[in-house]
């Protein structure tokens, strides 16, 4: 039936039903790292560990536990920045030559995305390079063989990559930042240990935390939001709003670190099933053109995302203000205005720049910025933009 196709079908699904894509297992709790080796060994005994260099201590503990159980381990260093196609190809070749049964990603979103991409590309390397599997390039190839099982151990409470089915990869030769995406890329196990984020410095806590908060808000109001993702966001938003400043002020605050780890996990599940919005649509372009880290880019764009969606998502945005930030507001519109001011104030307290010009963006550069924007996130944004409309709106905030 025609009415079931395309956008109308998506709206119908959002209203009446939904499909959930989740990691096969989630283990959450302080010191969950101590049990991670058991989850890994359920997937295989030849273990390729891709760890961020900042997480060397945790990686050593994990490797020792695996070896005590008789597992073989090959440990590789992550690229130390957001992954690029060359990083994935090099690491996938290394993994392929060794023949792992399971891939482990230990670190922030960059390390986990890199591990996720390596797990996907390594069995498919004869069919293409990482760039060939990126979506939205005009020549995307499907993953013919199933990815290797992935166990994800996040350490930054940010991207929620441990719960998503995509890996964001930069392709500098084409000035693109796109995803390899496949339902089979969901982790076999996500082991979320908030203790791993306890040593994170304040600037990384701020940027990754604002990524999680942006993901929660954008997926809460996204076109694909459903009863399940709503409930998840409603459990995580109040925690994130209260815990982010607390974790930034005192990195050893166990309750705040736990709440932020939960918020990031919830944001990953929610975005993977509801979609995102305009801030995540433009953030990759800020990264590829101006080198802005993902979390900082999301934070800079969040007030804009709230402003342009204030009519399309007024009831939910007003509810965020009334239920979890401040009770007072004359009406819903006033509540949204107060929420936007609160987010700007939060960014300022966290030391995050919110003006695009502070990152070097000029009004003249806006069309190029939007050319590189991600269509996926823009499609799930509550407000639809007429051709040229988004460029005019972005130019106003430069
Ligand atoms: Fe994000």
Image (spheres, rainbow, N blue to C red):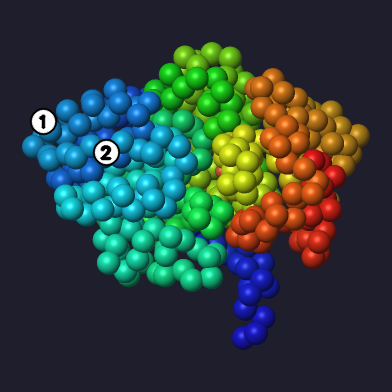
Q: Residues within 10 Å of mark 2 (few under 14, many from 20)?
A: some
Q: Nearer the viewer, residue 330 or 213?
A: 213
Q: Residue at x 54, y 13 (%)?
A: 250
Mark nearest the camera among 1 and 2 is: 2
Relative side of 43 to 280, left or right? left
In the picture of the structure, the residue carrying the numbered disc 1 is: 68
Residue 266 to residue 187: above or below: above
Q: Is residue 344 above or below residue 101?
A: above
Tell me what residue is drawn at x 17 percent, y 39 percent: 73
Q: Earlier in the sequence, mark 1 or mark 2?
A: 1
Q: Nearer the viewer, residue 135 or 232?
A: 135
Q: Residue at x 54, y 58 (%)?
A: 174
**x then y, percent, for residue 118:** 33, 51
With 10 as the anchor, is 382 left or right in this view? right
Residue 32 shows in the view: yes
* The quarter of the picture showing ligand 1: top right
Which dot marks residue 135? none
């Amino acid at each position: 039936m025609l009415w079931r196709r395309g956008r109308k079908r998506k709206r119908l699904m959002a209203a009446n039903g939904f499909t959930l894509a989740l990691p096969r297992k989630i283990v959450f709790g302080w010191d969950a790292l101590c049990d991670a080796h058991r989850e890994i060994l359920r997937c295989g005994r030849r273990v390729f560990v891709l760890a961020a260099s900042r997480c060397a201590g945790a990686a050593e503990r994990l490797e020792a536990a695996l070896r005590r159980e008789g597992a073989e381990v090959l440990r590789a260093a992550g690229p130390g920045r957001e992954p690029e196609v060359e990083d994935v190809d090099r690491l996938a070749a290394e993994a392929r030559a060794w023949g792992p049964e399971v891939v482990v990603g230990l670190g922030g979103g960059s390390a986990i995305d890199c591990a996720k991409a390596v797990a996907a590309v390594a069995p498919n390397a004869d069919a293409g390079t990482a760039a060939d599997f990126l979506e939205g390039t005009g020549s995307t190839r499907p993953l013919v063989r199933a990815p290797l099982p992935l166990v994800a151990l996040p350490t930054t409470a940010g991207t929620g990559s441990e719960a998503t089915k995509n890996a964001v990869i930069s392709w500098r030769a084409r000035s693109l930042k796109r995803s390899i995406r496949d339902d089979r890329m969901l982790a076999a196990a996500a082991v979320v240990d908030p203790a791993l984020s306890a040593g994170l410095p304040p600037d990384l806590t701020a940027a990754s935390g604002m990524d999680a908060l942006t993901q929660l808000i954008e997926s809460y109001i996204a076109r694909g939001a459903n009863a399940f993702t709503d409930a998840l966001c409603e459990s995580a938003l109040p925690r994130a709003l209260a815990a982010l400043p607390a974790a930034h002020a005192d990195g050893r605050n166990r309750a705040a670190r736990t709440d932020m780890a939960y918020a990031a996990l919830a944001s990953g599940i929610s975005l993977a099933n509801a979609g995102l919005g305009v801030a995540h649509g433009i953030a990759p372009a800020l990264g590829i053109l101006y080198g802005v880290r993902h979390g900082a880019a999301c934070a800079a764009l969040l007030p804009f995302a709230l402003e342009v969606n204030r009519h399309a998502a007024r009831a939910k945005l007003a509810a965020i203000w009334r239920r979890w930030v401040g009770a007072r507001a004359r009406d819903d519109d006033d509540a949204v205005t107060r929420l936007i001011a609160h987010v700007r104030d939060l960014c300022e307290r966290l030391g995050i720049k919110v003006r695009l010009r502070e990152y070097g963006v000029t009004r003249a550069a806006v069309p190029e910025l939007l050319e590189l924007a991600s269509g996926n996130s823009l499609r799930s944004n509550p407000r639809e933009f007429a051709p040229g409309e988004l460029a005019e709106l972005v130019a106003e905030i430069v």
